Image (cartoon, rainbow, N blue to C red):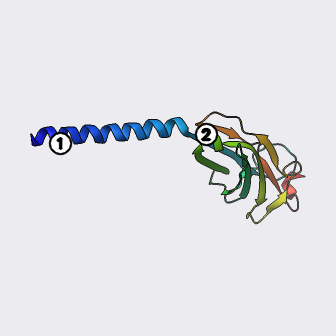
Amino acid sequence: MEAQKRKLGMDLFAFVLTTIFVVSNVEAWTGEIHGRVVCDVCGDSSIGPEDHVLEGAEVAVLCITKSGEVLNYQAFTNAKGVYTVAETMPESDRWDACLARPISSFHEHCTHLGEGSAGVKFTYNRPSGYFHTVRSFVYRHGSVPTYCI
């Protein structure tokens, strides 16, 4: 009798967990935005061996959801110069449109924002579990090193 009660309890527990998992998967939406921040050392608008990624650069991502809520994210680049913003929310509140913009570079030489790097607006229309890649933001040196001339 005790074994039957335990089995019934385990079956009920498994049913509740399965129900929670199925319901949450149906209603949940996950999105991700990522991009890269680089230093254009020579300021020539082309990637060369002298250029490098910027670790620790700050990027802001502002998103408006389908329900009209405004969400503001702050991200920093990793050692590969990549920043990532990710969110899981109800499908009805998922991102609709976003704006990603560079905030600052903490590199000692590469601190001047390059042309065309003021920000990127985009519609977020990816299904759950997929990501949107933002074009790279570029910083330049304050003065071009002599080996670039």
Q: Disc 2 on helix, strand or loop?
A: helix
Label 1 – label 2 distance at C-alpha: 37 Å
Q: Earlier in the sequence, mark 1 or mark 2?
A: 1
Around disc 2, counting alpha carbons within 10 Å, would you say few (fewer than 14), some (14 to 19), or many (20 or more)? some
Residue 34, how many percent across, how many down?
Answer: 67, 45
Residue 78, how many percent across, how many down?
Answer: 62, 54
Rendering quarter of residue 129: top right
Which residue is identified by label 1? 6
Q: Disc 1 on helix, strand or loop?
A: helix
Using the image as rendered, state which of residue 90 and residue 111 is in the foreground: 90
In which quadrant of the rendered image does the N terminus lie? top left
Amino acid type of the residue that numbered disc 2 sits on in the rendered structure: Glu
Around disc 1, counting alpha carbons within 10 Å, would you say few (fewer than 14), some (14 to 19), or many (20 or more)? few
Which residue is identified by label 2? 91
Residue 97, how many percent across, how many down?
Answer: 76, 43
Label 1 close to label 2 by CB (< 8 Å): no
Q: Which mark is residue 14?
A: none
Rendering quarter of residue 147: bottom right
Residue at the image point whose x is 60% and y is 48% from the top? 87
Amino acid type of the residue that numbered disc 1 sits on in the rendered structure: Arg
Q: Is residue 124 above or below residue 58?
A: above
Q: Is residue 131 left or right of residue 13?
A: right
Residue at the image point whose x is 71% and y is 42% from the top? 66
